[in-house]
Structure formats: structure tokens, C-alpha cells
């Protein structure tokens, strides 16, 4: 049995996918796409080690303790170089997680041909007339390269020492003087690059589970500036002490969103020790946090927000606050509910020394089947 490690590349930005969510975090059932693809491929062979590149190592480690999750780079090649540092086996198989449905048959044929060359590569033939600058190319000489590709580890590491940028392993191996052996690829191993590609593959729909998060924040009055709640000025001078603009409602809601998506808390993403966030617009931070939540495959179901303050009175502002939050998050207004209450003059809030906000949100997986 060949000595092989598996590298799954999952650190990309999905810039061509154009859906707001990174494609590696689309949910197939309960599994993010990167995990589904890795489970599929790793089930076919007893790999010496399984390495997954990531743009968020701590988050992805929550899904799979048995994989080596490593930080990726700014390009495919940089990510691969980082992953190869963890490979000691004679051979390494490299695949993109966007190729979700690689078959056992394809993997077996790659391994069966290890003796034929330094890199075994699946490729599809071109059936249609192909033009380049309005001139027909010879179809029989064109190959559509796929992954996974199986390479001799030492030669691939040597090839990547070059400053040249390679988009796949076979071109790197060929550049280093290695021999390439092509096998017939598979349509089912098509790579998801654009959102339309999802309709071409038979993939399970996302789970309908709901994820709840809570956020709580409190601030002390005492800074002579406008009091903002949800980006709305509710008092001209009853401001709070804070590193940012002190929008306690925005802070609470931000925490709730991040918590529901298991993405930490507001202090991790926007630390008050960073001068970049001095007097920061908290609604802008809320917007950025929700965009991050969406990148990781979630969308808002609803938010229920309770403002706890003896003063000022908020009845006339609740609707405007809800409207502003809905606009900021680009969701329907009915998904946002604002409540206001007092502490019946008890405690620091009752003494009008400060105010607090409690937010609860529900998230669901982004349903890519409806695009």
C-alpha cells in the first residue's frame, strides 16, 4: 500500500462565487462543504495524514479534531507550500474542496498509476469546438485538468521552491522536469467555481436547524455626547463612556450574531485596545460582523432586542431603531423587534447611572438550493 498523505485546499476567498457566503462553508446537511469533501475523499483510503488549509484555523478545528488544520496563504500555491511542511510521506494527494464529489474509482485509478510518473493527473477531453481569439484550436490537444492529483512529495516541494506561480501540481512538477501521467477525469469531479455550478451536482440540501445566540452589553452614562441606540440618536447629550461611539444596542446585537454562528465575540473581532476602533461607528461594526456571519454560511431568521434603561424614554424611537437595523443588515424589518423596559428604579440602571441591552438572535443555514 502506497505511503500517501492527503491535502485539501480550503483557504480561498470565493471571489468568483458571488453569493456572500464562502463556498467552502455552504452546508451540505450539517457539514460545511470543506468537511463534506474531505470526509468523502478520506473515506476511500487510509491516508497517513489528512491536512486541510484554512483562513480561520480555530473555527474549522471545531468541526474535525482528527484533521491537521493549517493556515493557508494568499494563493493556492502559498497554501500548498504551507501544508506540505506537515507532509513526510513518499506521495501526496492534493485536492480542492470545491471538487466535492470525487469518486473512489477516480482515486483508485490515481493510486494504481503511481509507478508511471512523478505526478498522476485526471483530465477531461474537450468535446466542443474551442476558440482562442476567434481561431479554432485542435480539441484533441486540449485537456481540462482536475484534482485530486497524486505527486511525489519531494519533487513537488522542490518544484514549489520556484518563484513562479503555479495553478496546479502537474504544471509545477513539469516545470521541475518531472513526468506527468494523465488519466481520464470525471464529470462528477467538476469544481464549484460559480454559484451556477451548484445546480450541476447532486448535493444534499442544508439542514434546517436553528442556531440561537445571546448578547449582553452595559455602559455607564457620563460622556457629554449623543446617545446612540441602533444608530439612532435618542438623546443629544446623555452619552456613555466607551472606546467606540458607545452604541450599546449595536454591541449587544453584534455579540448575539457572532455567538449564534460560533464565531467568538465582539472583543475578539473589534478589540477596544485597538485605536482603529476609537470612536468607531458601531453600526458599521455590526454590518461587518453580519457579513462575516454570512460568509460562514448563516443568515438571520430574527432578532429580539431588549433595551433596559430608566432614562431616556424610548417609546417613540423603537420603530426607527428597528428600521435602521434592518437597513444596516439588509433584512426585512419584520425580522427585527425592539423592546424597552426599566428596572423599576432599582440598581445602577434605576439610578440612571447607565443602561444595558440584551439581544437574542436566531440564525439558519443559507439555503443555496433556492438560488
Image: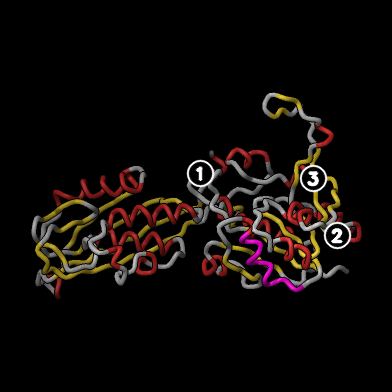
Q: Residue at x 37, y 51 (%)?
A: 302
Query: Mark on residue 123?
Result: 3
Answer above or below: position of 268 versus 11: below
Query: Mark on residue 19?
Result: 1
Report crowding for label 1: few under 14, some 14 to 19, many 20 or more residues within 10 A (C-alpha): some
Q: Nearer the viewer, residue 75 or 2?
A: 75
Q: Are marks 3 and 2 in contact (CB under 8 Å)?
A: no
What is the x, y in percent for residue 326? 31, 46
Q: Nearer the viewer, residue 262 or 98?
A: 98
Q: Which residue is mark 2?
A: 111
In which quarter of the view is residue 368 placed?
top right
In which quarter of the view is residue 131 placed?
top right
Helix, strand or loop at mark 2: helix
Helix, strand or loop at mark 3: strand
For residue 30, say whether it is visible. no
What is the x, y in percent for residue 304? 31, 56
Q: Residue at x 26, y 56 (%)?
A: 281
What is the x, y in percent for residue 78? 61, 60
Q: Nearer the viewer, residue 366 or 231?
A: 231
Q: Which residues are magenta?
A: 78-88
Instruction: Find the distance from the CA under tag 3 to the CA under tag 2.
Output: 15 Å
Q: Residue furthest top?
A: 134
Amino acid at each position: 500500500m502506497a505511503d500517501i498523505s492527503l491535502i485539501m485546499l480550503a483557504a480561498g476567498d470565493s471571489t468568483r462565487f458571488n453569493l456572500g457566503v464562502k463556498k467552502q462553508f455552504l452546508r451540505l446537511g450539517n457539514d460545511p462543504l470543506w468537511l463534506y469533501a474531505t470526509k468523502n475523499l478520506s473515506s476511500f483510503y487510509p491516508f497517513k495524514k489528512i491536512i486541510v488549509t484554512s483562513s480561520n484555523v480555530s473555527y474549522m478545528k471545531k468541526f474535525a479534531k482528527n484533521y491537521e488544520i493549517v493556515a493557508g496563504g494568499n494563493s493556492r500555491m502559498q497554501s500548498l507550500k504551507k501544508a506540505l511542511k506537515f507532509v513526510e510521506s513518499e506521495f501526496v494527494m492534493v485536492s480542492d474542496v470545491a471538487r466535492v464529489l470525487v469518486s473512489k474509482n477516480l482515486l483508485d485509478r490515481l493510486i494504481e498509476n503511481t509507478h508511471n510518473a512523478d505526478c498522476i493527473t485526471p483530465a477531461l477531453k474537450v468535446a466542443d469546438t474551442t476558440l482562442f481569439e476567434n481561431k479554432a484550436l485542435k480539441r484533441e490537444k486540449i485537456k481540462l485538468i482536475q484534482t485530486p492529483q497524486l505527486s511525489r512529495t519531494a519533487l513537488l516541494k522542490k518544484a514549489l521552491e520556484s518563484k513562479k506561480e503555479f495553478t496546479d501540481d502537474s504544471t509545477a512538477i513539469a516545470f521541475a522536469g518531472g513526468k506527468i501521467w494523465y488519466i481520464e477525469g470525471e464529470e462528477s469531479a467538476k469544481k464549484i467555481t460559480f454559484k451556477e455550478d451548484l445546480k450541476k451536482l447532486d448535493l444534499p440540501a442544508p439542514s434546517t436547524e436553528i442556531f440561537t445566540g445571546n448578547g449582553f452589553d452595559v455602559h455607564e452614562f457620563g460622556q457629554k455626547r449623543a446617545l446612540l441606540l441602533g444608530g439612532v440618536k435618542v438623546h443629544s447629550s446623555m452619552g456613555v463612556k466607551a472606546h467606540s461611539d458607545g452604541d450599546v444596542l449595536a454591541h449587544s446585537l453584534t455579540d448575539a450574531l457572532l455567538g449564534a454562528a460560533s464565531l467568538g465575540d465582539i472583543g475578539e473581532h473589534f478589540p477596544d485596545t485597538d485605536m482603529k476602533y476609537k470612536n468607531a461607528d458601531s453600526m458599521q461594526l455590526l454590518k461587518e460582523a453580519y457579513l462575516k456571519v454570512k460568509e460562514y454560511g448563516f443568515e438571520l431568521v430574527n432578532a429580539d432586542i431588549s433595551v433596559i434603561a430608566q432614562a431616556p424614554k424610548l417609546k417613540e424611537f423603537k420603530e426607527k431603531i428597528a428600521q435602521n437595523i434592518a437597513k444596516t443588515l439588509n433584512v426585512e424589518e419584520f425580522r427585527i423587534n425592539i423592546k424597552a423596559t426599566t428596572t423599576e428604579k432599582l440598581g445602577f440602571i434605576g439610578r440612571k447611572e447607565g443602561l444595558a441591552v440584551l439581544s437574542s438572535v436566531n440564525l439558519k443555514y443559507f439555503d443555496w438550493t433556492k438560488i
